[in-house]
Image (tube, helix red, strand yellow):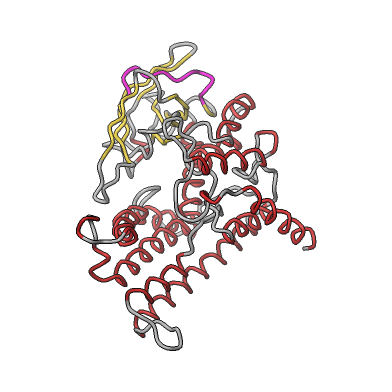
Amino acid sequence: MAELTEFRADVAQWLQENCPAGARGPGQIASGSSKIELEPDVAKWLQNCAEKGFTAPTWPTEYGGGGLTPAQAKVLYEEMGNIKARSPLMGMGMSMIGPTLLEYGSDEQKQRHLPKIVRGEAQWCQGYSEPNAGSDLAALSTRAEDKGDHFVINGQKIWTSGAATADWMFILVRTDVDAPKHEGISFMLLTMDQPGVTVKPIRLISGSSPFCETFFDDAVADKQDLVGELNKGWTVGKRLLQFERSGIGGLSGGASASNPSKTLIRVAKQYIGETAEGKIADDATRQNILDMNMQRKAFQLTASRANEENKSGIPGAATSIFKLVGAAMQRDTADLKRAIMGFSGLGAHEEVGFSAEELKATEEFLHLRTTTIYGGSNEIQANIIAKRVLGLPE
């Protein structure tokens, strides 16, 4: 305990000295993309944390990580939250392909890709879903043909988040069309900056276009970028999904410059009013916020306990529980915030008179509904929980 107390003091001092003002509070967060220009303070914050190993605090130091224990990483994130510091780096490199390569990658793959991820020098995207293979992912038909020292890929992926700005993709492809569908799939990596890859953004109801269609016309993946064994990619692909669901569900930790609990209280007092004692003026709203904040606190405590109990550090089927509950909680929080704002929470155009926060509330209301779909829909998570966690019959 004394060691953690000393570590907390050191971290707090380092953060005060090395986190620029422009990296605190809401704002830009680095994704590693070579196609996105970073604000000066955001770039400096990324550089400072990368040099310290704080972009990937629990990763091994040999790959640029911080080598911290989970308890130390938790302290780091808490102290970052105390000064409203944003995460220095986010994205699928950190939360998905990085942990997967640590477990399944060859020594060469780890040395080649992980340090770049830690330094924020590459953004990654996911090539899983296809127009005819969403919930039944093993039915994918994008093919990769063995050409000796490389594979040639043809097909289409959809809902490839961040593909328009990504530098690399991790992809599931069919490499044996005659094998049972789960056994003829391989997991590989490929660069997005090549003639055989075409990306088309999909505009969403929220107004943004994070999702894309991605087409492969004789795209190339090097043999050295096959992760795991040929035709055994389903195992690697499933493990990566567990890492993804851990991140969405809130199991992976991480720093956040926002506090949803405090935000709901502040917004309620602003739009509904407060009593002379400083309470939210409306009893029903106060109760709704209390219920939501209690649920969030219970979720955080349960997640902390689950991380401590999971000595291996490898997520299992229980991640579906946290993905299911965490995604629904994010959606419901956005719903409540918008409802508290009333008509002001329906803003779509700045020129009509809505504030930036009101416009943001509308965007969150629309966008966070997708958390119950991407990364495995709530229905899929419920099925996994029934089969793999509860052991219920088919």
Residue 82: quadrant of the picture: bottom right
Residue 300: quadrant of the picture: bottom right
- Which SS does the magenta portion mostly show? strand
The answer to whether 138 is drawn above or below residue 80 in the figure is above
Q: Residue at x 36, y 56 (%)?
A: 378
User: Which residue is nearer to you in this view: 169 or 36?
Assistant: 36
Q: Residue at x 58, y 37 (%)?
A: 118
Q: Quadrant of the C terminus?
A: bottom left
Q: Is-magenta flag for residue 42? A: no
Q: Is residue 81 visible?
A: yes
Span highlighted in magenta in the image = 216-226
Q: Is residue 318 visible?
A: no
Q: Position of residue 390 (x, y in %)?
A: 48, 61
Q: Quadrant of the N terminus?
A: bottom right
Q: Position of residue 49 (x, y in %)?
A: 62, 43
Q: Position of residue 196 (x, y in %)?
A: 34, 19
Q: Residue at x 51, y 56 (%)?
A: 256
The answer to whether 110 is drawn above or below residue 146 in the figure is below
User: Which residue is nearer to you in this view: 265 or 100?
Assistant: 265
